[in-house]
Amino acid sequence: MIFTVQDRQETFDFILSIAKACEKIVALVQVGSGAVGFTDDHSDLDFVVALDSNDSMKEVMDYFHQKVSRKYEIIYHGQIEQRRLEVFVLSNLLEIDLGFGCYEHAAAMKPAFKVLYDKTGVVEQKMIDSRKWMDDAIFGDKQKKDIEFICSLVWHRLMQAAVAINRGALLRARGIIEYVRTLYVDLLGDRYKLESKLNREMDKLPPDEIAKIKSTFITEDTPDAMWTSLLRLTDLIYKELEGQPISISKEMLLEYYEDLK
């Protein structure tokens, strides 16, 4: 049976109670949609667990595993120490994500968070203060790397798509066009400071930006539809990269396309 709102609340209360009972956990923070009020009945539970020390992480992860596995039937459990992450999926398909870190380095990756309890009295202020620089720290470096990477290859991928259309290899053309679209979405995500992986936060883009993405969708498995999508995507991604060094200009690409049509 799929979890209900009541199931989720009961699990929330349980996680809160076992966190408070562990001496090495000094604060618990709810993040994600639940921190500002769940938007639907199917949202999972996301927490940040503030530790007395990073040295306690493995011990506390094991503590949660022991407590949760005794209380619930678990169909998936993962501990990813490199990412400071522990994930549970219960038999009712409720997912519980726990992130870990020392309270001294508390920081809010996203604006939505709610401190559920704090024995130190400093975690909330640290998270509030971190919002002043966190987005730049996350997206600034990522944007620089994305631009450099995309400039180095996007023209080549667009040329490959054009050749595939010319040869009638429409599945290959579709695959390349969809890949280039993900690159374009990454650039938008960087500019708007939104998570672009799997389009996670792309619904938060302004409507005109969403419309631009949709304008590159391939509507039919025909060469004409492929060319329309490719031309639109070429225009959009070159506009997004305006002023950046790219080996092949948009004008050169358009001339290349004309020769292949």
Image (cartoon, grey):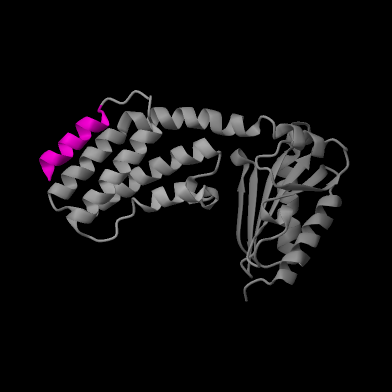
Which residue of the protein is positioned furthest toward the bottom in this rendering? Answer: 1
x and y percent of residue 143 in the render? Answer: 49, 31
> Is residue 116 positioned above or below 219 on the image?
above
Give the residue drawn at x 68%, y 49%: 98
x and y percent of residue 210 in the render? Answer: 45, 50
> Is residue 140 positioned above or below 171 on the image?
above
Task: Determine whether, in the image, residue 4 is placed left or right of residue 169.
Answer: right
Q: Is residue 108 visible?
A: yes
Give the residue drawn at x 74%, y 35%: 106
Task: Determine whether, in the image, residue 261 is placed left or right of residue 116.
Answer: left
Image quadrant in which you'd find residue 44: bottom right
Q: Nearer the viewer, residue 55 or 136?
A: 136
Give the residue drawn at x 50%, y 36%: 190
Q: Is residue 255 covered in magenta? A: yes
Q: Is residue 176 visible?
A: no
Give the residue drawn at x 36%, y 38%: 237
x and y percent of residue 177 in the render? Answer: 29, 47
Q: Is residue 157 covered in magenta? A: no
Q: Which residues are magenta?
A: 248-261
